[in-house]
Image: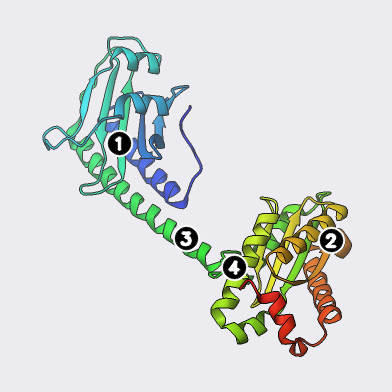
Amino acid sequence: MKGFESRGSRADYLAREVLTAQLQVLQTGLPLTAWAVFQHKGGDWHALAVSGEVGNTDLALLAQSILDGASVNDDDTAPFEFRPANAAELDLLGAQAGTSRIFRAILTPSGGHSRGALLGWLHGGTQMPTPDTRIVMPALASMVGIMHLHAELITTERLVLETRHEDLLDPLTGTLNRTGWDQYLQQIEAALKGRDEDAMITVLDVDYLKAVNERDGRAAGDEMLRRAAQTIHAVLRRRDCVARLGADEFAILLQDIAPSEAEALSARLTAALKSVDISVSVGLAMKSEAGSLKKAFALADSSMYANKRKKHGTPAARTDAEIESHGAAV
């Protein structure tokens, strides 16, 4: 069967289970070849639950043919239609004229924005069933309620995902924060397990941030950090990841990269930051060198601090001239 996605969100799964049970109830009140409940999203109709002998029917195309332009019937005495299939529908169903019929009901909740619909079809056979409204009407009412709850669950899921996503981001730079970095590192560590693929972690410390904050104010320091994040993103490949770990520290994960490529990219990164008047102390380590991404991160962090001490000595000893040279563009 085409046009049916068996996977999806938790809300989709729960709705599918309950709707399938209702379709089985509906079948006792109106025996048809097959039933399908559709949801309209992204401009297309998607089958949320199916029951019966669907075969090779293209559900998405069938729904588009029958449901596009359909609206809620305001006449409560006719909440559904059960009619002969037209020529186009017969072609989609691979059925013959005669006893082939289409059942259609709109399941849009009253006052809601979510669009849902029920289709049933009959082809073949010699007898024309008559809907038993004592079964059909309560089943339709239940499906309307289910679709309403499904829409609310989808909204709730989206809000939860957005909240979780925001919890993993640094609000100042838009990069991952420390929590997001730790989770991402664990995910990539698991994904690379058993694979012959190297990765590099680079740790950058923005020089003179504290001095800029003290001299020009926190807003100037924040702008310096945003500029650093934007520059880093501009140099990295799309699949690379950057995070702000602390006040002046960034970490970068570069996957599927050889040591020579990693060093060249690190050099380009340092040069790009220098071009926007940002000096950084850098430490890097390969996964193959450390044995794991977690150990590579610790090694890169240690290397960065060693290079910072070697390069600058005690941060408090910086002169106004040095601060000026690295914060002129702030």
Task: Give me the C-alpha separation between circle 1 and circle 4.
Answer: 48 Å
As drawn, which residue projects farthest toward the top?
97
Instruction: Give the mark, 2 or 4, whose residue is nearer the N terminus.
Output: 4
Q: Is residue 23 above or below residue 10?
A: above
Task: Give me the C-alpha separation between circle 2 and circle 3.
Answer: 33 Å
Q: Position of residue 159 (x, y in %)?
A: 42, 60
Instruction: Please state which of the two labelled residues, at mark 3 or mark 1, is closer to the viewer.
Output: 3
Task: Give me the C-alpha separation between circle 2 and circle 4.
Answer: 27 Å
Q: Which mark is residue 117?
A: 1
What element does badge 2 sit on?
A: strand
Q: Residue at x 30, y 36 (%)?
A: 117
Instruction: Give the mark, 2 or 3, whose residue is nearer the N terminus.
Output: 3
Instruction: Please state which of the two labelled residues, at mark 3 or mark 4, is closer to the viewer.
Output: 4
Instruction: Please state which of the two labelled residues, at mark 2 or mark 4, is closer to the viewer.
Output: 4
Q: Residue at x 57, y 72 (%)?
A: 223
Labels 2 & 4 near each other (Cβ < 8 A): no
Task: Give me the C-alpha separation between circle 3 and circle 1.
Answer: 28 Å
- Colour scheme: rainbow
Q: Circle 3 sits on which residue?
A: 162
Labels 3 & 1 near each other (Cβ < 8 A): no
Within 10 Å of disc 1 (Cα), the crowding (few <14, some 14-19, many 20+) is many
